[in-house]
Amino acid sequence: MARLLSVNVGMPRDVPWHGRTVRTGAWKTPVHGRRMVRRLNVDGDGQGDLAGHGGEIRAVLVYQLRSYQYWQKHLGRDDLAFGMFGENFTVDGLPDDDVCIGDRYRIGEAEFEVTQPRVTCYRVGMRLGEPAMASLLVAHHRPGFYLRVITEGHVQAGDEITLTREGPGRLSVADTDALLYLPERDPAMLRRALDIPALSPGWQQSFRELVAAQGPGAEPGRTGERGGSQGPGAEPGRTGELVAARRPGAEPGRTGERGGSQGPGAEPGWTGFKAMRVARVVPETPTISSIYLSTTDDTPLPAARPGQYLSVRLAVGGAAPAVRSYSLSATPTADTYRISVKHEAHGKVSAYIHATLRPGDLVDIAAPRGTFVLEEGTRPVVLISAGIGATPVLAMLHQLAAVHDPRPVWWIHVAHDRAHHAFADETRALLARLPHAHEHVYYTAEGAPPADERHITQGRPTASSLAAMGIPADADAYLCGPSSFMDDLAARLRENGLRPEGIHTEQFGALPAINPGVAPTAAVRPHRPPGPPGGGPLVSFARSGITTPWSPAHTSLLDLAEACGIPTRWSCRTGVCHTCVTPLLAGDVTYTTPPLELPEPGTVLVCCCEPATETVLDL
C-alpha cells in the first residue's frame, strides 16, 4: 500500500543566483499535522512562477522515496531531506514508471488526478546545488508528477494512498516525460497521449505539434522533428516554460531584421557565409538605401521565401567583423538579392553601408533564413508596416504581384511624410498588377496629405479606420514595425474579428528575455563582456551587433550572451527543453553537456555548448 510520508510547503522567496535574484517556491519543508489541500495548492504553500508551476492543473507536486534513495546513491549525498525536490507530497510508492496520466488517488479526505510530469526547470538544480539536475531527472526517468485536486480535504503524513480510478490509455508518467523530451518517439504513443483528457493542455499542444511534424505515415520508433513552440504565457509543455522564440538585435528600430529559424526540414541555401558582390546601391529616401547583391561565380542563387532575411558580415574599421541581418525587400532573381537598410543614428554597420559601401565591393552573406513568410492559400492578405518595417512585407507584395494573385490584398503603411515614404512608387506599381488591391497610407507628420491622393491619410490607423476598410475576418495579416505599433494594430485586428492565428508579426526590436523566475532588471544595451578579453575563437551575436573572443571563464554560449547583456531565452539550462534553441549562421560548437535530443540542423542549444571555431549566432 502506498503511503504519504511527508507534506511539504513553502512560500515563494527571493534567492540570489549568479548575480541575479530568482523568485521561487522550490524551498519546501515538511509540516506536522493535518493540512488542507485546496483547488490551487496546499495551505501554506505557494509557487513563484505560475507560468510553469501551480494553478489547477499543477496544484500538488509528488516525488517518491525510492527516487530519493536513488539520487542519494547516484549523487553520493546523504543530505537529501524531504521537500528538497520541490515536492508537496513525498510518498512511499507511486513510481513514475507505474503511475499513469489520468490515474486518480484518494489521500486522507482529498482526491487527486495525475495531469503531467514535472516541468524541466533549472530551479530544482538551484535547490539541490546540482546544476544538471533538470537533465538528470529526464535522462534517468525520475521526473515526479503533478496532481490536480478533484475533491478538497485534509491530508497528513501517514495517510494511505488508494487508487480510485485508472486513467485511460495507461501511459505512465515516465513514458510521457520521455515522449516529450527524448528522441525516438513512437507516433502511436504520441497519438495515444492525445486521447487522455486529464493530460494538461500545454503537453497536449506539444504532442499535437510533434504529431504534425512527424507527418502522415511516420513509422514507430522514428524521431519526429521537434514541433513549434508555445506562445508567451502558454502552459509549458515540450519547450519547457515558454516560447522558444528569436530576438532581433542591437540597433534600435532597424529593420529588415527578423527573428526565427528555418522551419522543420527547411535547410538554408548554403552553410556559413559566402562572398557576394555589391551590384548597385540605390537611395530610396534620405535615410534608406537598397543594396543589390550578385553572385561572384555566376551560380544561380537559391530561392528565398518572401519575408526572409539575409545576415551580412562586414569588417567595419579595424574592429572584428560585425554581423547584422536585413530582410530581403524584393523577390530574388537567379543572380541578385536586394536588401534595404536604414541609416540608424548610432548604428556603425548601417552607417558604414550608407557611407562606404560601393558597387564592386565584396560582402559576406549568409543564406536566406526566417519563418515570417507569406503563406500559400486562398484567404485574403493584409500587409501592414511602419517605416523600414515595409521591407519583408514588400517582398511579399512582389510575390503576389508576380503571379497576379487573385486574393484580395490590403496594403497599409505608416510613414513620417512624403520624403521618408520609402518604396511609394514601387508599391503603387505592384498594387496596380493585382486585381483586388486596396492601399491605405498614413503620414504621421503635421500637415495635410496631397488632395489628389485619396489613399493617403494624415495620422495613424485607428480601430474605426481599420473597420471601415472591410478586411474579412478570415484574412491572413502580416505586420512589421516597432513592437508598440504591432501590438496596437494586432489588437485592433482581433477586435475587428480577425483570427488570432491569422495575425503574424515580425519583431525587429529586442524581445523581452524569457528567464523564468528571475527578477526583472533594467534593460541595458548589449555590450562586450566585462573583464579581460579571452583568447578563444570569435563569437558574433548577429542580432545584437556584438563580436567578442571566447573565454573559458564562461560556462556556455548562453552564459556569454548574458554577460554581454543580450536578451536570452532559456528554462532548463541543461539541454532538455530547447527553449534556448538558436540558429547557427556560421561555425561549429561543442556540447559540454550533451543534450538529451540534438536540435534541428543549423541550430544549437546555447545553454550547454561552447564555440569550437569562429561562431556566428542569430541572437
Image (cartoon, rainbow, N blue to C red):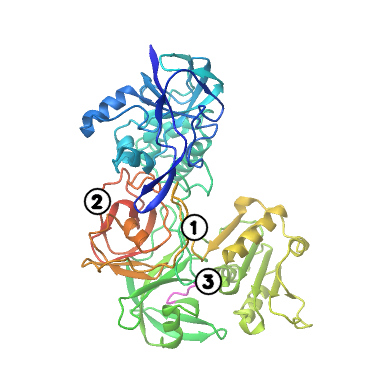
The answer to whether the residues at label 2 and label 3 have Cβ atoms under 8 Å apart is: no
Q: Residues within 10 Å of mark 3 (few under 14, many from 20)?
A: many
The answer to whether the residues at label 1 and label 3 have Cβ atoms under 8 Å apart is: no
Foreground mark, 1 or 3? 1
Of callouts 2 and 1, the N-terminal one: 1
Across and down, in percent, residue 535 comes to 20, 68
Q: Which mark is residue 592?
A: 2
* Mark 1 vs mark 3, CA separation in Å: 15 Å
Q: In this rendering, would 473 be left or right of 22?
A: right
Q: Is residue 118 above or below residue 486?
A: above
Write the residue at 37% across / 48% down: 16
Where does the magenta region start and end? Answer: 328-336
Asked if residue 58 can be seen in this view, the reply is: yes
Q: Work out whether residue 41 or residue 555 is closer to the camera in this orientation and state it.
A: 41
Across and down, in percent, residue 355 comes to 44, 87
Across and down, in percent, residue 462 comes to 73, 64
Q: Residues within 10 Å of mark 2 (few under 14, many from 20)?
A: some
Q: Work out whether residue 68 or residue 389 is closer to the camera in this orientation and state it.
A: 68
Q: Which mark is residue 512?
A: 1
Three-letter code, disc 2: Thr
Write the residue at 32% across / 44% down: 597
Of callouts 1 and 3, the N-terminal one: 3
Q: In this rendering, would 360 be left or right of 132?
A: right
* Mark 2 vs mark 3, CA separation in Å: 36 Å
Write the residue at 40% across / 62% down: 566
Element under label 1? loop
Residue ID for mark 3: 253
Three-letter code, disc 1: Pro
Q: In this rendering, would 262 be left or right of 559?
A: right
* Mark 2 vs mark 1, CA separation in Å: 27 Å
